[in-house]
Amino acid sequence: MTLSDVKIRSLKPKTKTYKVSDFDGLFVAVNPNGSKLWRFKYRLDGKEKLLSIGAYPAVSLLQARQARDAARAELATGEDPSERKQEEKRIRRESQGHTFAKVGAAFLDKQRKEGKSSATLSKTEYHLKLANKDFGKKPISEITSPMVLRCLRKVEAKGNYETAHRLRSRIGSIFRYAVASGIAEHDPTYALRDALIRPTVKHRAAITEPKALGALLVAIDGFDGQATTRLALHLMAILAQRPGELRHARWDEFDFKEAVWSIPAEKMKMRKPHNVPLPAQALALLEELRPITGAGELLFPSLRSWQRPMSENTLNAALRRMGYSGDEMTAHGFRASFSTLANESGLWNPDAIERALAHVEKNEVRRAYARGEHWEERVRLADWWAGFLSEMRAE
């Protein structure tokens, strides 16, 4: 006899659980506490099994029958509906544990193990803090593109367009890490590539007129602040490396006999070791610096601690003190000065100039063939550039 809603409601609890059948294996189990639970009894490979469907009346008679019919359809294809349900529970349980915040923390730990720079780690931590405010506690598999966009819009609304773009990129990296780890199926930031306001590209200020550059070098000569700051600015001008690479430079990286500064991969932006030829003018500056900081490990330690490098703001602050605004010159701008004037001279292979700046060729075919470092030409280029600066300063 099939069940009806009237009959199910009339079922009273007893001292022991009992069951009342519907048909095709479906029945309702009535427990002593009064709860009524749907079950589907079936056989697979000669074994009797039970599939839990839910509690009445939350699951109606019609819904229970539909669930039974779906399970019977699975059985017809050789699948076990009970195992499928358990697998779904497992996936759901695991996804609840893989929140964005936890996956983000794992991604940050991966970056630490890869030896990423402190600057990169700090940026990742900052971006995680922004994202976690909006969806850090949500399972990463449940985060959608609109959720991410709402987070990005908050940053964008403050006029921080570049930060919004970088945040989207960082969130995307975390999702791709999750996809590779098997805890997410896709990266929702991919759909947001054109959703944000594009920031106006603003190149770092640099002096590229020879006589103006010479005037800057004279101003550095007359700098009345710390001697280490003056020497750092002169070395920035001659060596044209990134400010962070010079600030973190260690004495054991310099070979005075071979006149080479060997920067290890972990300090380079592109994570590749880089050698810098040292012209006579640079060696003279280093000899002047050695009595001041040579007893320690760092060329340019902080005034507060010899274990830490000088602040990233020190060099730019010195330029401001000499009267050069942020729109006129920056510490990083010495690289643009070198690149512009070396290329305009027409004396040097552009590839040698790019290699001197530790730039990586974007064209994969050209990169495959650019196996040499143009070292001999770079040594001549370094000597020429140091001499050129001396001439401009003299004029």
Image: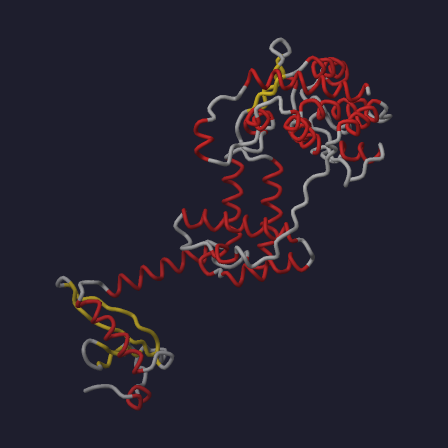
Residue in the image at 73% along x and 29% along y: 310
Q: Along the line of sight, which residue is nearer the eye, 99 or 117?
A: 117
Residue in the image at 58% along x and 54% along y: 131
Report the side of 33 relative to 330 (left or right): left
Query: In the picture shown, does residue 86 fall above or below 313?
Result: below
Residue 295 in view, yes or no: no
Quarter of the image where the N terminus is located: bottom left
Q: Residue furthest left?
A: 46
Report the side of 150 relative to 335 (left or right): left
On the image, the x and y values in percent for residue 123 come to 61, 43
Identify the colour scheme used.
secondary structure
Q: Residue furthest bottom?
A: 6
On the image, the x and y values in percent for residue 172 come to 50, 50
Q: Along the line of sight, which residue is nearer the eye, 317 or 26?
A: 317
Query: In the picture shown, does residue 33 fall above or below 102?
Result: below
The total number of labels drawn is 0
Query: In the picture shown, does residue 167 fall above or below 261?
Result: below
> Could you say which quadrant of the image residue 136 lies in?
bottom right
Q: Along the line of sight, which residue is nearer the eye, 64 or 351?
A: 351
Q: Along the line of sight, which residue is nearer the eye, 233 or 370?
A: 370
On the image, the x and y values in percent for residue 44 come to 16, 64
Residue 116 in view, yes or no: yes
Report the side of 281 relative to 184 (left or right): right
Q: Residue furthest top?
A: 257
Quarter of the image where the C terminus is located: top right
> Could you say which quadrant of the image residue 95 lies in?
bottom left
Residue in the image at 33% along x and 87% along y: 9
Residue in the image at 50% along x and 48% along y: 174
